[in-house]
Amino acid sequence: MTTTMTVVDGTDALAFVIIRPGSQDNRVAIEAAANGIGKRDAATVLRHVADQWTAEEPAPDFPATWAGGHALVIGYGDEELSARCQCGEQLGTATPDKPLDHFATPWERHVMALGH
């Protein structure tokens, strides 16, 4: 069994919303939190973001799968940590006693090479 964790630096985030594919078709799972912003202001920001999206339907080239972005994904299995980019690029392995910083440099180089 492998446990997967996605790392996002949100230390100065006022709020976050993560929308994932749900366990059933036509369902989503939502994780959200706010710290320092009220519901009304957060809703205004989310409405503004939604207004900026031009497509009513998801782009067929980027469905809600691992291939849709470049987040650093760290998995744990068989007594070792393994890292990869969300796009599938393998970034290395390490033992659990090592800091996760071990994966930051290869991931950053990968993303910088893409021009993002």
Image (tube, helix red, strand yellow):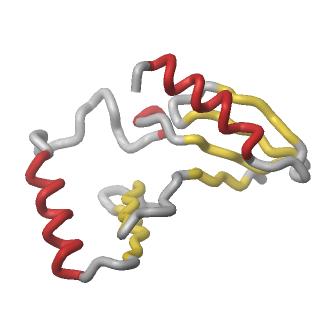
Q: Position of residue 47 (x, y in %)?
A: 13, 63
Query: Measured along the vertical axis of the image, is residue 106 above or below residue 48?
Result: above
Residue 65 image-quadrant placement:
top left
Q: Nearer the viewer, residue 29 or 47?
A: 47
Q: What is the count of numbered marks?
A: 0
Q: Nearer the viewer, residue 5 or 102?
A: 102
Query: Measured along the vertical axis of the image, is residue 85 above or below residue 49?
Result: above
Q: Which residue corresponds to the image point at 53% horizontal and 37% vertical from the top-left?
A: 86
Query: Measured along the vertical axis of the image, is residue 116 above or below residue 24?
Result: above
Quarter the C terminus occupies: top left
Q: Which residue corresponds to the image point at 58% horizontal and 41% vertical from the top-left?
A: 72
Q: Is residue 101 visible?
A: yes
Q: Nearer the viewer, residue 62 or 110?
A: 110
Q: Which residue corresponds to the image point at 18% horizontal and 72% vertical from the top-left?
A: 43
Q: Residue furthest top?
A: 113
Q: Nearer the viewer, residue 28 or 8?
A: 8
Q: Position of residue 71 (x, y in %)?
A: 51, 41
Q: Is residue 24 visible?
A: no
Q: Which residue corresponds to the image point at 35% horizontal and 78% vertical from the top-left?
A: 36
Q: Position of residue 76 (x, y in %)?
A: 78, 50
Q: Position of residue 70 (x, y in %)?
A: 48, 35
Query: Measured along the vertical axis of the image, is residue 81 above or below residue 30?
Result: above
Residue 17 image-quadrant placement:
bottom left
**In this image, 95 relative to 100: left or right?**
right
